[in-house]
Amino acid sequence: MEVAMVCTRVNLLILILSLCSPYKFIQSPMDFGPLNLLPTTTTASSDFGRILFHSPSAVLKPQAPRDISLLLSFLSASPLGKVTVAARGAGHSIHGQAQALDGIVVEMSSLPSEIEFYRREGEGDVSYADVGGGIMWIELLEQSLKLGLAPRSWTDYLYLTIGGTLSNAGISGQTFKHGPQISNVLQLEVVTGRGEIVTCSPTKDAELFNAVLGGLGQFGIITRARILLQEAPQKVKWVRAFYDDFATFTKDQELLVSMPVLVDYVEGFIVLNEQSLHSSSIAFPTNVDFNPDFGTKNNPKIYYCIEFAVHDYQNKNINVEQVVEVISRQMSHIASHLYSVEVSYFDFLNRVRMEEMSLRNSGLWEVHHPWLNMFVPRAGISDFRDLLMDSISPDNFEGLILIYPLLRHKWDTNTSVVLPDSGSTDQVMYAVGILRSANPDDGCSHHCLQELLLRHRRLAGAAASGLGAKQYLAHHPTPAGWRRHFGRRWERFADRKARFDPRCILGPGQGIFPRDSSSSNGAFASYS
Ligand code: FAD
C-alpha cells in the first residue's frame, strides 16, 4: 500500500514537471498509478457558450473522491506549483468557467453515480438524497420519482450537474417559494484546494459549506451533496397569460409570488417577435391562439408572458382548476389570453429538453451562446427593461429573454452567492436571462459574436453602476472587475480563498484569482 502511494507521488511529480515544462510532451494516455490521467479531449476545452476554447494539458477521470484529493494534495504541496485544476460538470457554462488552460480538468461524470435515499423520521419528517457531485439533476429526478419524491428547487434545464449548479445558485420558477438550490442542501462532501476531504454542513465546518455554495468552484470540489426532497405531485397545471404592458406584467408576477400557498412556480418572458412566440410554445402542449401585432421594424410592439404552475397531488383533495381560477381572477392579463394545460410533473420539469431536441434537429443547439444573466433590484427593473430594449433589435433577436421575481429572504447571505445590495427592505428582486443564440451559419460568426458580447458587457456595466444589478453566472474579464462584482463581499471571498485554496489551484476558468507565475506561493497574495 505504502509502495503504491510512493509510486503515485513519484508519478505525480513527473506530471507536475511535465505540465510545467515549456515543451508540451503529454501526448498520449499517461499511467500515473491509480490516477486515471488522460490526454486532453475536445470536450474538456469547450462548453455550451462556444465562445472560449481553452485546452488543458490533461484530464482526470476520478473513480473516487480520493483521486481528486491525491491530485490536489500533491499540487498544493508542490513547490513548482503553477498547475491549475477545474472541475467540469456537464460543461454548460458560457465563458469557459469549467476550463483550465494548460492545467487539469476533472471530469466529474466519472465518479460513481449511485444515489442513496433517506427518510429522517421524528421532528419534521425530512426526506433527502445523497448524490454524487457529477450526477445530473435529471438522474436524481428519475430516481426520486420512483419513490414519489423530488427535490424542491430546480433549474429550467436538468442536464446540469449537482456540483455545477450548487457552485452558482440554481434558480428557476420555484425559487421564490423554496429559495435557490443552494438553500436546499443539508450537507456536502468537498475536496478542498489543499486536498482535504471534508464533510460539511450548516453545523459542521460551516465556513467551508457556505463558501462552496455559490462559490464558483473556487474553494473545493463538491463530490457529494445531501439534497432535501419533498413529496412529488403527479401532475402540474401549467398556465400562461399574455400582457402588452410591462408594469402590469411585473405587478402580476409580484402578486403571484405573494401567494406561495397556492402557487408553486412563477416565471415570465418577453415576446419579441413571431419566432420567440413560436419557440417558447414548443414544450407547451396546447394551442395558443395569440397572434399579436408586432408593429414595424422602426416601431416595434412587444409583449410579455407570465408562466405559473400549480402542483396537482392526486392523493390530496384539492381541485387545481379551482385554485387556478382563484389565482387568475386576481390577474390583469390581456382579456381572454390565458391558456392552461395539465402535464405530468416529469414533463413539466423536463420541458427544456423538448426545446433542446427541436433546436438540435434544426442544427441550432451547437451554436454560440452569448448569454447574460442578471439579478436586478425591483426598483430598477423598469429601467433595466429600457436599457435592454435599447441594446437589441426585436425583429432579429434569436433566443429567449426570461424575467421573473425572486424573494431575498429565501437566500442565505452566508453563502458565497452575490446578490444586489438590498438598500431597502424590499424583498423582491428580478432574475433576468438574456439567452441569445448566434448562429455562424446564419451570418453571426466572429465579428458579430464579439459585437454581441460587447453589447452585453455594456448593458451589464450600465445596470451594475446605474441600478445596482449584479451578474448571475457572472463573467468578468479582469480581477478588478471581479472585485467590483463582489463589492463589500470581496474580503470574505478572498479570506475563504486563502483558507481553502491558498495556492489558487481551483477554478482558473473564472479568472478571479489568476496565478502569478513569478510567485512560488501562487498569486493569492497579490490579489487579496
Ligand atoms: P460546468 O459548466 O461544468 O461548471 C460550472 C462551474 O462550476 C465551473 O466553474 C466548474 O469548475 C464548477 N464546478 C463544476 N462541478 C463542480 C463541482 N462538483 N464542485 C465544484 N465546482 C464545480 N442555471 C440556473 O440557475 N437556472 C436555470 O434555469 C438554468 N438553465 C440553464 C439552461 C441551459 C440550457 C444551460 C446551458 C444552462 C443553464 N443554467 C441555469 C446555467 C447552469 O446552472 C450553469 O451553467 C451551471 O454551472 C451548469 O452546470 P454544469 O454541470 O454544466 O457546470
Image (cartoon, grey):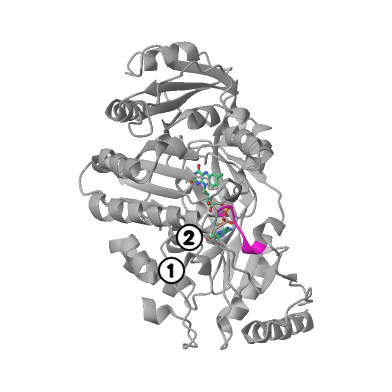
Q: Earlier in the sequence, mark 1 or mark 2?
A: 2
The x, y position of residue 252, in whole percent, is 32, 25
Any magenta on residue 48? yes
Q: Which three-letter amino acid code belongs to the residue tagged 1?
A: Ile
- Give the residue pinned by disc 1: 512
Task: State yes or no: Cβ of the residue under disc 2 lies below 8 Å from any atom of ligand 1.
Answer: yes
| Mark 1 touches mark 2? (CB < 8 Å) | yes
The x, y position of residue 109, in whole percent, is 68, 56
Residue 304 in sight in this render: yes
Q: Residue at x 58, y 78 (%)?
A: 83
Q: Is residue 468 left or right of residue 363?
A: left
Say which of marks 1 and 2 sits in front.
1
Magenta span main SS = loop
- Give the residue pinned by disc 2: 216
Residue 492 in sight in this render: no
| Badge 2 element | loop
The x, y position of residue 350, in whole percent, is 60, 34
Q: Residue at x 34, y 43 (%)?
A: 388
Q: Which residues are magenta?
A: 44-49
**Relative to residue 440, is residue 97 depicted above or below?**
below
Q: Which three-letter amino acid code belongs to the residue tagged 2?
A: Leu
Q: How many marks?
A: 2
Residues packed near mark 2 inside 10 Å, few (<14), some (14 to 19) or many (20 plus): many
| Badge 1 element | loop
